Image (tube, coloured by chain):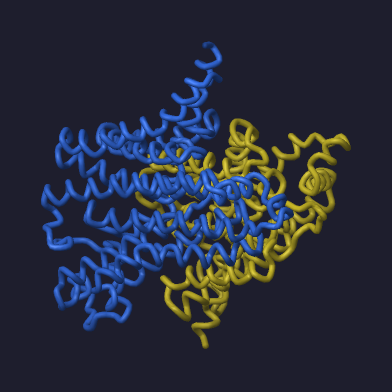
Chain colours: A yellow, B blue
Amino acid sequence: MEGVLNQLPIGLSIGAVLLLIALGLTFTFGQMGVVNMAHGEFIMAGAYTAYLLQGVGFLIALPAAFVVAGLMGLVLERTLIRRFYGRPLDTLLLTWGVSLLLQQLARDLFGAPNVQVASPAWLRGGIGILPYNRLFIMALAAASVLAIWAYMNRTGQGRRMRAVMQNRRLAATSGIDTGRVDQRTFFIGSGLAGVAGVALTLIGPVGPTLGTYYIVDAFLVVVAGGLGQLRGAVLAAAGLGLLNSYAEFWSDASLAKVVVFMAIIGFLQVRPQGLFFVRSRALS
Amino acid sequence: MTAPERSVRRWQGPAVFTAVAVLALVAAPLLLEPFRLGLLAKYLCYAIVALGIGLAWGQGGMLTLGQGVFFGLGGYAMGMYLKLNDAAGDLPDFMVWSGVEKLPALWTPFGNPVFALAMVVVLPAAVALLLGALVFRQRVRGAYFAILTQALAAALVILLVGQQGLTGGTNGLTNFFDFFGRDVAADETQRGLYLLVAVVLGALYLGARQLVRSRFGRLLLAVRDGEDRVRFLGYNPATVKTLTFAVSAGMAGIAGALFVPVVGIISPALLGVVPSLELVVAVAVGGRFALAGAVLGAVVMGYARTYFSEELPDAWLYLQGALFVLVMALAPKGIAGLAANLVRRREARA
């Protein structure tokens, strides 16, 4: 019984990390039709930011990683991705090339072996079966979701973002500068991946290929949650995190991914567009 | 266009095909030393997978990022037969090392060469049929499909690595000796295998070309360019896509089975997310809209990888990434597209 309970914080904290990663993906995919494989490398960039700022303080690493990863996303959007809007398959391959470049860059800058980031003292230990570091990750994800929700629903910028996501051409006709909105979405989404990277330093080592372990699962969260859907992403991330950790617990680690994959395919039989989606009369 | 020009046009394709076939079947075995010939055989195996990707993605619009899965299923089916054949009634060596005492039931039928060879095509095609039927029927498409195939590749690798006693784990299946009565490592056998791979590639290329030109192929193109319109005309796009996906999976399975005796190993590292994507990129570099472009891309990228990782090992990953970005940004139709542009420009000037 204790083993079963122990899996709970593990599953939920993995879900929280997946959520932070998937938020950026679901918005860039939903708003711009961009499948960004280099998103995983923004996680890696965030994690290395935390590594470099180890002496300075963990809480400073969070906003720093947000800005570093966000700026990387912004540069990528301005230089390359902008030319590929509405061609998701091409952006997928294009950004995979970018992700190879960034991985090799990290290898040259920080060395190929993994590095360990020392957790701050106040995050060691825990209450009962709840380790502080995993609790902190969950709180971080919850705070981020709240902030995003408030941004989208309570600010002018967020309203414009939702407008562009729902109908780009109509938004443009209404005088919204869609280019600016796209840049902001990219900055925020990439920044959240950086924050996820900092969170990951609490539960494991950092290496140049860190992002590749999470990017596939994060995309599955987008598929299961529905495009550009905050609620969907939250539920799907929690579900996927728990499913992953319990499938590992009850079968074994090598079968878990197969179980998750089959669960997703099964889920798509019932909800082919994901948990939530914008109803429309358009065909595709 | 005048009549003689048109007849030149008609003979151009077969002439190029024959020239390439003579080059591949006669010149290459005579001129290349055994090591280089082996490399070429390996690239041609990849070219078979690329042909399948060209069919599914270039013609059908289904970006499949999991061809490694099908390549692996074919490869493991062949590898299991070769292992059992070498063991001659005993347990394969890696099972002894990982403490397996009795041959697993999954392995038993693969001792039969006919069964194993059938599974090379049947297993990948069946997995693709099942996945395609479930996914396409629900109108899940485009990037969603790409992501799902990628997740499948990731899951299979973890499964293969984890089931050490059943699959040989990270090392995969290797150390083969006998290939249907011949020493698999002998130069003679390897030359024969090269010829076999080249002939299979040629035959599959002709078959795929025929498929694209058939009524079914027209329908496939129509599904790529306007799935909903095809549905309104009374066809079921899901069937067309599923069948094409299964054909491309079967090709990858054949490639995997040929790869095993040529290279001497099949392991999870050869069929995961990265190798699957690399082949898609090779197809993009060669030109995804032309079947010949896909084949060309696989061979060119194979040589590029070998050359650069021998000469400039550190620069290769940068080069590969940069190549990707440049091809997608500047020449989305790849080498074949650039060549077609050149021809068109020359014709316009004439």
Q: Find the residue positioned furthest to the top.
A: B350
For the N terminus of chain B, give its image quadrant.
top right
Residue A172 in which image quadrant? top right
Where's residue B240, x and y in %? Answer: 58, 56
In the foreground, B251 or A30: B251
Residue drawn 63% across the image and 51% down it: A25
Q: Is residue B161 visible?
A: no
Where's residue A164, x and y in %? Answer: 79, 44
Q: Find the residue positioned furthest to the front.
A: B3
In the foreground, B308 or A281: A281
Where's residue B264, x and y in %? Answer: 22, 55
Residue drawn 70% across the image and 38% down it: A183
Residue drawn 51% across the image and 56% down it: B245
Q: Is residue A280 visible?
A: yes
Relative placement, left or right, of A60 versus A235 is: left
Residue drawn 50% across the image and 30% down it: B337
Relative placement, left or right, of B249 versus B34 is: right
Relative placement, left or right, of B331 versus B165 is: right
Q: How many marks?
A: 0
Tell me: residue A46, above or below residue B315.
below
Relative placement, left or right, of B134 versus A114 is: right
Residue A161 in which image quadrant? top right
Where's residue B218, x and y in %? Answer: 58, 46
Tell me: residue B233, above or below residue A76.
below
Tell me: residue B178, above or below residue B34.
below
In the foreground, A235 or B33: B33
